[in-house]
Amino acid sequence: MAGELPEVGERITEAELAVMEALWLRSPLSATDVADAVGKARGWGLATVKTLLSRLVSKQAIATEPQGRRFLYTPLIERSDYLGGESKRLVDRLFGGRAAPLFAYLAETEALSDTDIAEIEALLKGLRQEEGK
Amino acid sequence: MAGELPEVGERITEAELAVMEALWLRSPLSATDVADAVGKARGWGLATVKTLLSRLVSKQAIATEPQGRRFLYTPLIERSDYLGGESKRLVDRLFGGRAAPLFAYLAETEALSDTDIAEIEALLKGLRQEEGK
DNA sequence: CGTAGTCGATTACGTGTGTAAACGTTGGGA
DNA sequence: TCCCAACGTTTACACACGTAATCGACTACG
């Protein structure tokens, strides 16, 4: 996935995640850019976005690069690492580290569409193939 | 899964979850019982457990039943509902509601054991069978 | 019958989070 | 050159959370 990943000690919160999503979509971005991208949907003013950006910087989740008198922000952690980490966290916390029960519950909450099922089966086929390592 | 489920407006936190797990294992329990069950592992005193129980009561996640001079606590929400809900939350929040990408990330983080894979395969097979509804 | 221990309820307190305003600086247009 | 607008930084504040002590009531033992 990502070779050397900068570990984020502190966890990224819900609000901060919205900012990360914007930066994962396109980066580097200025604070104003980010505010334009996420502010509308969440009803945030520029001030709020600036706070979130600062906190992400101190959590070492994003980096700043000076451009003239302002900063451009870039993610330091990759989206895939974040998603993988959060998924693993959930599986560990709620399912004792075993993924099969998670899918059982997803099936019960009808969170598994036919498309999902087909796609997962395709993935499984791939996994089985490389099984011999 | 569970017919009429009492909705928990407020979310159950990490610490509170430990208490819920104890009650899901065995209930009803007194505060002291719960403290005996989870206090040791988490290093909590009785006072802390009592606070968590009160908060769970006000969140309507558990109910009290007076027994003599003390209360016995019982879960109001079922473990399966909680797990299903949290799983769905994750899929919605991080994967746009689609489970297949989640599966892909778990596979990448090597969070999937051979057993998991076999079990998921069996599960999917079952789902496909009842597909025609 | 008094008192110590126990129970639930109330209060406490530091930190994280969501949300933002205020402040000090500085570059760019008039 | 002067001032305003825009930047990043600092400060703010209410509420949630983790963790617990304190308090007033009551019960059971001595």
Image (spheres, coloured by chain):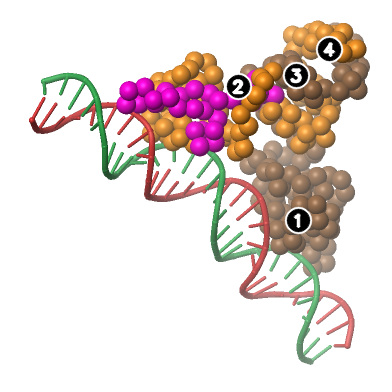
Chain colours: A brown, B orange, C red, D green
- At a point 76% along the width and 36% down the height, the residue shown is B93
Q: x and y percent of residue A54 in the render?
A: 69, 55
Q: Looking at numbered disc 3 in the image, what kind of residue is underneath it?
A: Glu
- Tag 1 near tag 4, CB within 8 Å: no
- Is residue A100 depicted above or below A28 in this figure? above
- State the separation of the CA atoms marked 2 and 1: 35 Å
Q: Which residues are magenta?
A: B56-84
Residue projecting furthest to the front: B4
At label 4, which amino acid type do we have? Answer: Leu
User: For the residue labelled by badge 2, is the local secondary structure a helix, a strand or a loop?
Assistant: loop
* Marks 4,2: beta carbons within 8 A: no
Look at mark 1 in the image and give the residue it sits on: A43
Q: Residues within 10 Å of mark 3 (few under 14, many from 20)?
A: some
Q: Label 4's element?
A: helix
Label 4 CA crowd tier, 10 Å (few <14, some 14–19, many 20+): some
Mark 3 or mark 1, which is nearer to you?
A: 3
Instruction: Locate residue A130, reporting x and y percent.
Output: 88, 12
Q: Are marks 1 and 4 on the same chain?
A: no
Task: Say the numbered circle drawn on residue B127.
Answer: 4
Q: Are marks 4 and 3 on the same chain?
A: no
Q: Which residue is mark 2?
A: B78
Decide which of tag 3 and tag 1 comes sooner along the chain. 1
In-front residue for pair A126/C8 = C8
Q: CA distance from mark 4 to mark 3?
A: 10 Å
**How far from the left and from the top, in percent, is residue A75?**
79, 46
